[in-house]
Image (cartoon, grey):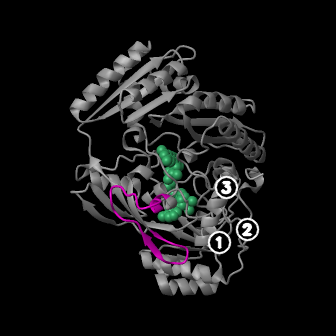
Amino acid sequence: MSSTSFNVRRVRRQLEHLLGKENVSDAEIDRICYSRDTWPLRLMQLGRLVTKPQPDLIVWPTRVEHIQQVLRVANAEHIPVTPVSGGGGVCGGALPTQGGIILDLKKMNRICGLDEESYTVTVETGVLGYELEQYLSARGYTTGHAPSSIFSSAVGGFAAARSAGVLSSKYGKFEDIVVSLEVVLPNGEVLRTKTVPRSSMGPDLKQLFIGSEGTLGIITELTLRICPVPESTKFASFLFPDLHTGMEAVKQIFRRDLRPALIRLYDENETRFVLGRFMSPPEGASVLNLTYSATKELVSLERRTVTRICEAAEAKSLGPKPSKHWWDNRFDLYYPSSINLGPGMLYDVLDVAASYANLEKMYWKMREAIEKLGVSTMSHFSHFYPDGGNIYVIFIGHASSPEKAEAKYSQVWKVGLDAAHRAGGTLSHQHGVGLLKAPWMPIEHGPSGFALIEAIKQHLDPNNILNPGKLGLGSNGSHSHESPTANGGVNQ
Ligand SMILES: Cc1cc2nc3c(=O)[nH]c(=O)nc-3n(C[C@H](O)[C@H](O)[C@H](O)COP(=O)(O)OP(=O)(O)OC[C@H]3O[C@@H](n4cnc5c(N)ncnc54)[C@H](O)[C@@H]3O)c2cc1C
């Protein structure tokens, strides 16, 4: 049963008329399927058969006009609309917390054009990362965007949540790959930014919608930068006596203007996990996995120079095997629903980022705060830039009941993100905000910054129909649904 107040049957008939019967459903099985995304807390709740929050209706638009029509109906009736692309988001961003309509964009999956002169590709929002890369690689190209969720997430979701692929050091995050976009505003109007390499005509509107997680508009089409598939790919691993020495070497790599496609530095706990099948690393040691992917000449130069930097830092070369093993399994790791979240288990990943001046301090503070709760951590740094990088703190714990595990899960996030904020970091590098990090939005942006974001939301979406409650925006909608965090206490 839904707690939303509109006449579901009447609206369903209206939408069936506009989109076709096959593109609208209020079947219970569909409503249950769309009661989840890939947020580990939601998966834990599903383990005890909590099937709320549910949407009232699911629609599958096949073209932009359908989205315009859905939003006009939703505005007239004050119905919440939650967009979903792949459903692989890990923060509850695609959960229909206030019921209403799920707008599943997977049928908008056409590749609209390849511009081999400008090196761009234009795609509809529902194209999965993997489908796009298959299409491009058959023609000798890549976007370079390869997140571990490439099979389960779509380009619209990558843009909406500011995703980062594993090769971000070379290709950038998704916001660096987007050249232009088309978005349907909450009132049904279409806004399209120009497909140009750069512009100085005032603020960059495309960046307003990138990262807006469905709260300001529905992204319908994207033009993305592409590159030739690299000529050569080589692997290397180095073992450092400790994390600090490894971090100093990474800084040197960037200071020498090198950009290996993949650079992953592991703390001592995850080093034991990563190297387990190859060796037993010494206490405190830290492994660095590298992938060089470029022209043959550049790969050869990168290998020689990085090897010199690492050897000067007293690192031991482990050859290519550990890094190559990670690469071959890069899409298999850490899939939350494949981990046995048995009763009482808790698991997730805090993805934060900071400048080099704060990065190591932030790691130690977060680790200390989380481990004080009796929860284990292992961490890696996998997205590096010339001025800093991210931390990926994986935590695994146990409690005496599923309900207690959910409460402990929320405590871990609270102490972890508070520690990251105090250390000067951003509270999300790549997974976005959703419901999970919504309470930290005013903390991250400060009172004036968050008030500005709220004012933009109020201007674009006065009826608060688009993804209410996500990013901490528009949570006072007229419809109420039990929040999935109510038991977990994330919002407390
Ligand atoms: C196993 C696994 C591995 C992962 N690895 C990575 C990784 O390496 N790097 C990384 O960055 N992330 C990773 N993620 C997280 C996830 O893939 C990203 O957050 C991705 O950007 C979500 O895309 P999606 O299509 O699945 O989005 P969804 O879950 O469908 O939606 C995410 C958010 O965006 C909104 N939204 C979706 N589509 C649109 C649209 N067209 N217009 C407006 N709003 C929209 C939704 O309402 C929601 O708020 C991983 C997730 C899993 C489960």
Q: Does residue 336 appear left or right of residue 492 in this picture?
A: left
For the stretch drawn in magenta, what is the main secondary structure? loop
How crowded is the residue under tag 1: few (<14 C-alpha within 10 Å), some, or many (20+)?
A: many
User: What's drawn in magenta, residue-wise?
Assistant: 183-207
Check disc 3 and report the residue beneath it: 448
Q: Does residue 422 appear left or right of residue 317 in this picture?
A: right
How many angstroms separate mark 3 from mark 2 (CA)? 20 Å
Query: Residue 29: which quarter of the image?
Result: bottom right
How crowded is the residue under tag 3: few (<14 C-alpha within 10 Å), some, or many (20+)?
A: few
Check disc 1 and report the residue beneath it: 464
The residue positioned 51% from the left and 16% from the top of the image is: 281
Q: How many marks?
A: 3
Image x and y of residue 446, in percent = 67, 50
Amino acid type shown at disc 2: Asn
Image x and y of residue 363, in percent = 61, 30
Q: Nearer the viewer, mark 3 or mark 1?
A: 3
Vertical side of 444 occupied by 242: above or below: above
Residue 487 seen in this snapshot: yes
The residue positioned 53% from the left and 70% from the top of the image is: 103
* Contact? badges 1 and 2 (CB < 8 Å): yes
Q: Does residue 279 appear left or right of residue 42 in this picture?
A: left
Residue 46 seen in this snapshot: no
How many angstroms separate mark 1 from mark 2 (CA)? 8 Å
Q: Earlier in the sequence, mark 3 or mark 2?
A: 3
Check disc 2 and report the residue beneath it: 476
* Contact? badges 3 and 2 (CB < 8 Å): no
Amino acid type shown at disc 3: Ser
